[in-house]
Image: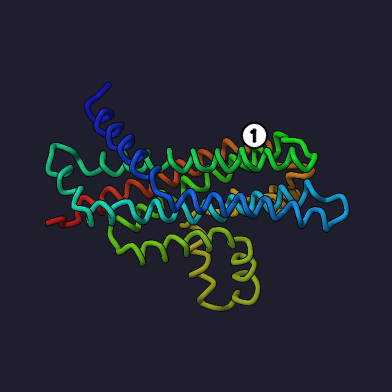
Amino acid sequence: MSVAWMRISAIAKNTFREASRNRVFAVLVLFCVGMMAFSIVLGRLSVHEEVRVMMDLGLAGMDLVGVVIALFLGVNLLSKELEKKTVYAVLPKPLPRWQFVVGKFLGLSGVMAALILAMSGVLNLFVLFVGGDVTELLLRAEALVMFEMLLVIAIAMFFASFSSPYLSAMFTAGVWMIGRGSAELEALAAGKLADSPARFVIEGLLAVLPDFSLFFVSGAVVESARVSIHETFVPWLFVLSMLGYALLYSFGALAFAAALFQRRDLT
């Protein structure tokens, strides 16, 4: 094992231990579980749609809570280290700052993955409770949510490398909302704003920013076909391609984060 990987692993493990102790995450996960439980009530009010309602609200709750947690994890990456002065004890040692950034990302990604797995397990149990089956379609949708959260963490870390926690949170949330509404923005640019300079701004943003709508595709049109976890969903090949998509964008965001953090004056 190389010295660089040993340093990165040490930072990742320490980050995982520290972040996993945060009680805020437990509250948010409980909120998500509460949404799933409430979906049982809504399902009973519908006509034989308990499983459909449970899956839809459960995935939506996982996605919403996951974004909040990922945003919190990524934004507080460096600000908490700077506030507690712990970063000053680490960086003066023979540790390149890019290794510090990568180690933090891996540690936070581990926490995020554990939380998503926990929420997915609860959702699967609720689906079984209302008489449904935990199919591969649901597992694919849950995997896409996890990949989306890892990308949100990387983007949050990018903004946290050079701005304040509040601005980082606003920027990251803005990127996520633009990416989630990419189809609507594209239609707006081609329609009402076709002759407006704003069209080029929107098209430029959509060309550069990640398309988060690709990670939550149930009910959307993918490759000219409407997909749904209740009927015909995207194949595992699509899920794997989204993993590559998330990793590619995350690598770019972390590379810029490391470069900007390298130039940051910590004195």
Residue at x 72% of width, y 35% of height: 134
Q: Quadrant of residue 108?
A: top left
Residue at x 37% of width, y 62% of height: 168
The residue that mark 1 highlights is: 236
- Secondary structure of the residue carrying numbered label 1: helix
Residue 185, percent across and down? 59, 67
Given residues 171 and 60, the one toward you in this image is 60
Residue 58, percent across and down? 66, 49
Residue at x 50% of width, y 70% of height: 200
Q: In the figure, is residue 75 to the left or right of 60?
A: left
Residue that lies at the very extreme toward the right in this rendered image: 47
Residue at x 62% of width, y 53% of height: 34
Given residues 68 and 143, the one toward you in this image is 68
Given residues 104 and 21, the one toward you in this image is 21
Q: How many marks?
A: 1
The answer to whether 202 is drawn above or below residue 115 in the figure is below
Image quarter of the N terminus = top left
Residue 148, percent across and down? 52, 47
Image quarter of the C terminus = bottom left
Residue that lies at the very extreme toward the top in this rendered image: 1
Q: How is the structure coloured here?
A: rainbow
Residue 60, percent across and down? 63, 54
The answer to whether 3 is drawn above or below residue 92 in the figure is above
Given residues 179 and 192, the one toward you in this image is 179
Q: Callout 1, which amino acid?
A: Trp
Mark 1 closeness class: few <14, some 14–19, many ≥20 residues within 10 Å: some
Q: In the figure, is residue 255 to the left or right of 181?
A: left
